[in-house]
Image (spheres, grey):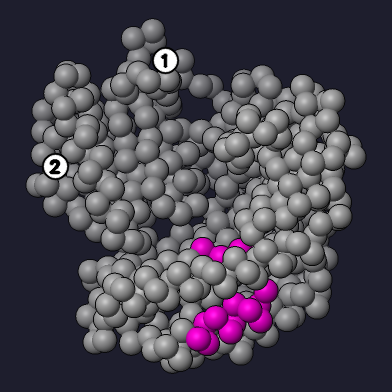
Amino acid sequence: MVVERVPSVDAKSYKVVTYGCQMNVHDSERISGLMEQAGYVRATGSDEADVVVFNTCAVRENADNRLYGNLGHLRPVKDKHPGMQIAVGGCLAQKDRGEIVSRAPWVDVVFGTHNIGSLPALLERARHNATAEVEILESLEVFPSTLPTRRESTYAGWVSISVGCNNTCTFCIVPSLRGKEKDRRPGEILAEVEALVAEGVLEVTLLGQNVNSYGVEFGDRLAFGKLLRATGGIEGLERVRFTSPHPKDFTDDVIAAMAETPNVCHQLHMPLQSGSDAVLKAMRRSYRAEKYLGIIENVRAAMPDAAITTDIIVGFPGETEEDFAQTLDVVREARFAGAFTFQYSKRPGTPAATMPDQLPKQVVQERYDRLMAVVEEVTWAENKALVGEAVEVLVAVGEGRKDERTGRLSGRARDGRLVHFATGDIGDQIRPGDIVHTVVTYAAPHHLNADGAPLHHRRTRAGDAWESGRAPRTPGVLLGMPAVRPS
């Protein structure tokens, strides 16, 4: 049984603003859990929060600009709101440290990626001392899974299996900000999944900077495949995803586990970064295009319906027109279902930032536009092949920006594709978290439409939780802890 702290009528409110990757989104759920455990309540509507927490990203240059721009906009708000506090955490805080307070002296707390759990105490200390508190640790204070979590979704949950990264990619600042890889024990991970399923969650995504190197810390190179198989024994768990694997660590036992475990989705997000062997070498990515395509070939041999997505960087220092053409060739051969595409940007402290042959902005932009055109051509062709096929959709909140105008609802198919679907005459019965089976009638490069009446609608416990307004809250999950239900 979990005893939740009940906030007083004059409890302070909080708001968390998140930038960046899924890891940050999940960290923000932990920040929310910590704040509510400390007696704060989430700000609603247009009300100004008493505490605003920015959970930052440092992967791209515009992340800095966005943060300092938003901090500037908050300064007059804080001036009119006595007692308001602003906290900055995450990767950019780990990188910039005390510089944040120097550039924005109205910030009250700066905390890093390794000490999220200190936030409530730092806020109280800053309030008491009337001075900014900056606390950046160089290694984990406690594993994040031991912190309370306020989940944002009633039907899907993030579960960290590791934090940190042992790779040394020349463009990436993450290892210096998140530290070396630390793996959770399998029993601890499965206990957290069971706790989520007990709350009605149908889908979990296993998270790590490099999920398929999971087990390196305790000496089991096959641990990730075993973990995928173990999720198959969790009753009530319908979908398992994971992100992101590294091609250098991808092994056949993981492909077999994906294919043979019914609740593991046939979806793979595997970063390519470049299709040029020369650029991959300069990036210090220890695989080559042939190996990458070989993994995809093996995945599709085991799971012909697998949807494969990727990350690609354009304009890495020294990239030639021939290098770029090789990337386009790999995109066409891989037949990606989707791609996150990025223009290379310098990150201070990374080897790539000081490499010769930095490309002019106009060259990078022109190549980026050409890449986007090829990606859309490929993804559209892949999506068109699904017209007329039946799909199982987990109904979601906020996936379809035009849903209200078009009369559709939206959700994700098992392969991760976004589906906008008509509800027929049962629209008032379908809730986020429910399962709908429908038939694809139209394909666009980035989504599918299903404009006929649903074939089947299944009400779920996740839908019940959404209807009741009950978001899952999990306490810190330790090794061997059984499923936990809030009182």
Residue 446 percent across, percent down from the top left: 62, 56
Residues shaded magenta: 325-340
Amino acid found under the numbered disc labelled 1? Pro
Q: Indicate the quadrant where residue 257 lies.
A: bottom right
What residue lies at 68% left-to-right and 40% top-to-bottom?
Answer: 410
Q: Is residue 137 visible?
A: no
Q: Residue at x 37, y 70 (%)?
A: 365
Q: Residue at x 25, y 53 (%)?
A: 64
The quarter of the picture where the C terminus appears is top right
In this picture, residue 296 sits left or right of residue 121 = right
Q: Is residue 362 magenta?
A: no
For the residues labelled 1 and 2, the Cα–Cα distance comes to 31 Å
Q: Is residue 254 above or below residue 463?
A: below
Quarter location, residue 214: bottom right
Residue 88: image location, x then y, percent: 27, 42
Quarter of the image where the N terminus is located: top right
Residue indicated by mark 1: 7
* Horizontal side, residue 307 vs residue 426: left or right: left
Nearest-to-viewer mark from 1 and 2: 2
Task: Tell me the chief SS of the magenta region.
Answer: helix
Task: Judge by depth and name the residue closer to the eye, 135 or 479.
Answer: 135
Amino acid type assigned to the residue bearing label 2 in the image: Ala
Above or below 24: residue 249: below
Residue at label 2? 104
Q: Is 259 in front, or is 403? A: 403
SS of the residue at dot 1?
A: loop
Specify which label sits upstream in the sequence, 1 or 2: 1
SS at mark 2 in the image: loop
